[in-house]
Image (cartoon, rainbow, N blue to C red):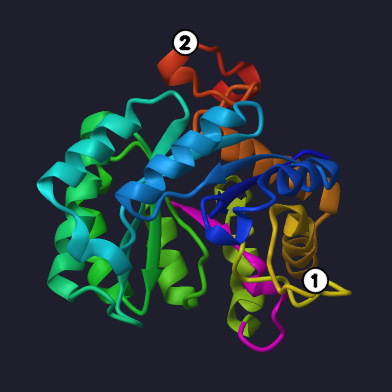
Amino acid sequence: MELIDIGVNLGNRAFADDLETVLERAAAASVLAMVATGTTVKESRKAAEIAARFPRQVVSTAGVHPHHADSLTTEGLQELRQLAALPEVVAIGETGLDFNRDFSPRPDQEKAFAAQLELAVELEMPVFIHQRDAHARLLPILREYRDDLVDAVVHCFTDTREALHDYLDLDLYIGVTGWICDERRGETLRGIVRDIPANRLLIESDAPYLLPRTLKPKPKNGRNEPAYLGYVLEGVAEHRGEDLEQLGATTSANARRFFRLGRGLRISDKEGVDLGPELRSQ
């Protein structure tokens, strides 16, 4: 089985001392590819550098998380545009709205989100979206741009059935994390994960965060890693009532399609690599 982790914060300081070992453990656990998430201009640059160092395992995104939306300047947006031109950068984001913590003023979040959606439209790249306690505001903004976006995923989905179907009505992909392994907080997600069409389902670790509660024994440092993605897959398979191997193959095919990945982990649109009939037909 070959898994793809569509969202991991490899530039986080939690991985500063042993990144190569983390990637080796991931490969040993059948997580053969991963997408390093950009959350600021600086972190997007770092994610791209990591992807360039490990071209057979890692690609990256370029964006500014809503927590940092008030830091996005005209110059910063231009640097995101430049980063997005790199062959290792496969999506715009992480961008969106977070009204749970409000680390950036909400008007700044909305402005930064719209600016990055416009960038994704301009560059014809998929979008990696964060949403927390902001569905009612994010949805109309997203609807305004959806017809012109090539694709979008709501990553780390933890919202309601109504929100899920709103996103599915826009033909979005849905990313599921170790939240589904949490018998306390993940109850709603466990009950609605069956609603996600097979061709719109993606899995992610969001490491170093969201360590699966089903992992035993837990690491002493409490750090999540891409190597634990299989626990997310197991949780999704259990609550969808599906075969583990088949589900793993499906989510990996979805990830390759969404991020336009060739078999050698480089995006076909930028390098002219043929996706192959099995991906072109999906």
**In the figure, residue 106 lies in which quadrant?**
bottom left
Residue at x 35% of width, y 36% of height: 150
Taking the image as shown, residue 223 lies to the left or right of residue 280, namely right
Picture quarter with the N terminus: top right
Q: Pointer 1: what residue?
A: 219
Picture quarter with the C terminus: top right
Report the front residue among 190 and 61.
61
- Residues in magenta? 172-185
Image position of 275 with respect to 187: above or below? above
Amino acid type, callout 2: Gly
Q: Is residue 213 magenta?
A: no
Mark 2 crowdedness (10 Å alpha carbons): few <14, some 14-19, many ≥20: few
The 10 Å Cα crowd at callout 1, few under 14, some 14 to 19, many 20 or more, is: few
- Whether residue 63 is visible, yes or no, is no
Which of 187 and 266 lies nearest the eye of the viewer?
266
Q: Disc 2 and disc 1: Cα gap in Å? A: 42 Å
Q: Is residue 153 visible?
A: yes
Vertical placement of residue 114 versus 195, above or below: above
Please indicate whether residue 8 sits to the left or right of residue 250 in the image.
left
Residue 42 at x, y = what percent? 34, 48
Report the residue at 62% width, 31% height from top. Answer: 54
Farthest residue toward the front? Answer: 17
Residue that label 2 marks = 272
Dot 2 falls on a residue whose secondary structure is loop
